[in-house]
Amino acid sequence: MTATVRPRGPAAPVGFSPAQRRIALAAPRPAAGLTSEWRLVDGLRTHTRRAADPGTGAPPVVLVHGLAVSHRYLTPLALALAPTHPVYVPDLPGFGLSEHPPGAYDVGRHADHLAAWLAAYGLPPACVLGHSFGAEVAAALAARRPDLVRALVLAGPTSDPAARSRRGLVGRFLVDVLREAKWQAPILLRDVWDARPPRVLATLSHSVRNAIEADAARVAAPTLVVTGARDPLAPAAWRDGLARVVPRARTAVVPGAAHNVATTAPAQVAAQVRDLLSSS
């Protein structure tokens, strides 16, 4: 049975000061306790932004970014979780500061790379949070490698079958642009520049051909499906329908937030991650 939870904390999404934007764009330089490192994973030099282990004994949290973006826009959530959890934010192949493979990976290949990345770090079973396209990758990882995933968070998951086409997804994205906080623009533009538009478009095609619900039905880990109340890419009917497919799922909605709920409401999402882990 799925329970809907109203996250604690302020109802409205928060802004990002110029100093906070500089932290998000700082990599590979250290900033606010976050550092960068590269490891060779399946032959690709893979970048990870990480926070130090706070020494609480809590399980690690791995944040998986969405389409066209990178670790940068997940920096607010990484900082919100860092006081209690070791936090890792890898850049998927072809995005952020990771090496570009010859072609754009589909969901399954990204999930395989993420499994190899986890093995390279030797992490214990982790809480894996995927946002948007990253939720598709996280669900595929949890379905294929349940031994690696202690808990799963699907934040603003794509792609809703009601708009499962390039045209449908782009149309919803354009609606979302009008609802998002404008301070995100410099971060998102930098990410698109790093990935390059052809890779973004190819990955979009992979996303709309992927049935996340098929992977979700095979997830054994306790799962949270969280969205912003104003998210046009993951509306309420899709959020709740996807949660019903997962054997052990709950839902949460953040009032005032749109699609980039992990960026604009990091305190609320971090509180829900902690609740999920404390109750599982």
Image (cartoon, rainbow, N blue to C red):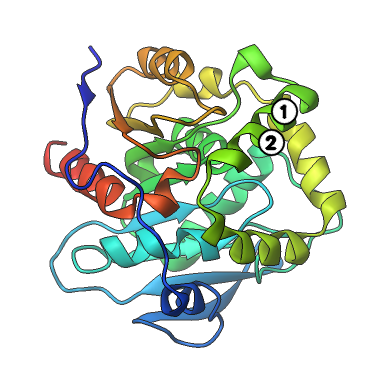
Residue at 16% of width from left, 36% of height from top?
280
> Is 236 situated left or right of 220 in this image?
right
- SS type, badge 2: helix
Q: Amino acid at mark 2?
A: Leu
Query: What quarter of the picture does the N terminus occupy?
Result: top left
Which SS class for mark 1?
helix
- Residue 56 relative to residue 37: left or right: left
* Residue under the image location 69 percent in, 19 percent down: 164
Q: Which residue is mark 1?
A: 171
In the displayed structure image, the side of residue 111 where residue 14 appears, left or right: left
Tag 1: residue type? Answer: Gly
Q: CA distance from mark 1 to mark 2?
A: 5 Å
On the question of residue 170 being in view, the answer is yes
Q: Is residue 221 visible?
A: no
Query: Against 73, is 12 above or below?
Result: above
Quarter of the image for residue 256 reads top left
Q: Residue at x 73, y 22 (%)?
A: 168
**Direction bottom: furthest residue:** 29
Decide which of 67, 174 is in the foreground and name it.
Answer: 174
Q: Which mark is residue 174?
A: 2
